[in-house]
Amino acid sequence: MRVATPADKPYAETITTEMEESAKARGTGIAKRSPEYICQKMDEGKAVIALTPEGSWVGFCYIEAWEHEKYVANSGLIVAPAFRKTGVATEIKRKVFDLSRQKFPNAKIFGLTTGLAVMKINSDLGYEPVTYSELTTDEEFWKGCRSCVNYEILMSKQRKNCMCTAMLYDPVEKAREAEEKARLAEVHRGPVPGPVHQRRQFKGNFKLFERWVRFKQFVLLKGWRKKSEDGTPEPKKNSILSFLFFS
């Protein structure tokens, strides 16, 4: 597992094909990426690739920067079917997260995903679930959602909600938490167990969050189908749940 280089371009078509096939199998949407785009990320050193000793492709993920590098997204995580549920995805996410921190130390790192396993990995890395309003406003980023099967749902919600869950790592906030923890440790002359502050108490409530994600997706999809069929307004349950969870 390493940073991808131009020598890895022969894997680009395999990677993009597997991205699309995986999304179809899950029945979820994904912003499509071309082999040329993946090759560009390899040229820029903004991707992580995993291979077997024999040279078979195992997994991939890449980095995108937005708003003059104010935000960074770790996108396109994909693992070959034969290597899923082996811990490869976790290691790739850790590697690409470290690469993002190295290249863009002051950027907020965010991701959009429908996968609960990815959400758990993000949580372990320090990401927090956030509302879409805390993500980049760069139009180029949102244009990438046009090829997603859920794009109409996203636009019907004025880009404030969709099937994906948004998660964010804020280095400024993390630094403040570390400083506060160090200050308290000095005051008490010993280590302070656990995080000083958890904005949304996410790590301790992942099972609850999992149920909330599934219900949110169910409500959004049900509401969209109903609106498409008879023109009636979408139900408001998802906005109520968002208020309860994120406030």
Image: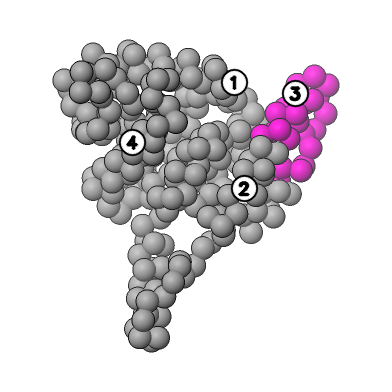
Three-letter amino acid code of the residue under disc 1: Gly
Q: Which residue is mark 4?
A: 92
Three-letter amino acid code of the residue under disc 3: Arg
Q: Position of residue 68 (x, y in %)?
A: 31, 44
Asked whether the residues under the numbered discs 2 and 4 touch, taking CB atoms below 8 Å apart as contact, a structural biologist would say no
Three-letter amino acid code of the residue under disc 4: Ile
| Stretch of the chain drawn in magenta | 216-239
Q: Which residue is mark 3?
A: 225
* Residue 127 or residue 82, whichever sits in front: 82
User: In the drawing, does residue 201 fall left or right of residue 241?
Assistant: left
Describe the element under mark 2 as helix, strand or loop: helix
Q: Position of residue 47 (x, y in %)?
A: 27, 32
Disc 1 crowd, CA 10 A, few/some/many (<14, 14-19, 20+): few
Q: How many marks?
A: 4
Asked whether the residues under the numbered discs 3 and 1 touch, taking CB atoms below 8 Å apart as contact, a structural biologist would say no
| Quarter of the view holding residue 201 | bottom right
* Residue 192 or residue 160, whichever sits in front: 192
Q: Earlier in the sequence, mark 4 or mark 1?
A: 1
Is there any visible trace of residue 140 in the rendered image? no
| Quarter of the view holding residue 149 | top right
Q: Kindly report which numbered mark, 2 or 1, lies closer to the viewer in this rendering.
A: 2
User: In the drawing, does residue 202 fall left or right of residue 216?
Assistant: left
**Numbered badge on residue 187:** none
**Residue 130 versus residue 82 in the image, above or below:** below
Distance between the Cα atoms at labels 3 and 1?
15 Å
Q: Which residue is mark 1?
A: 27
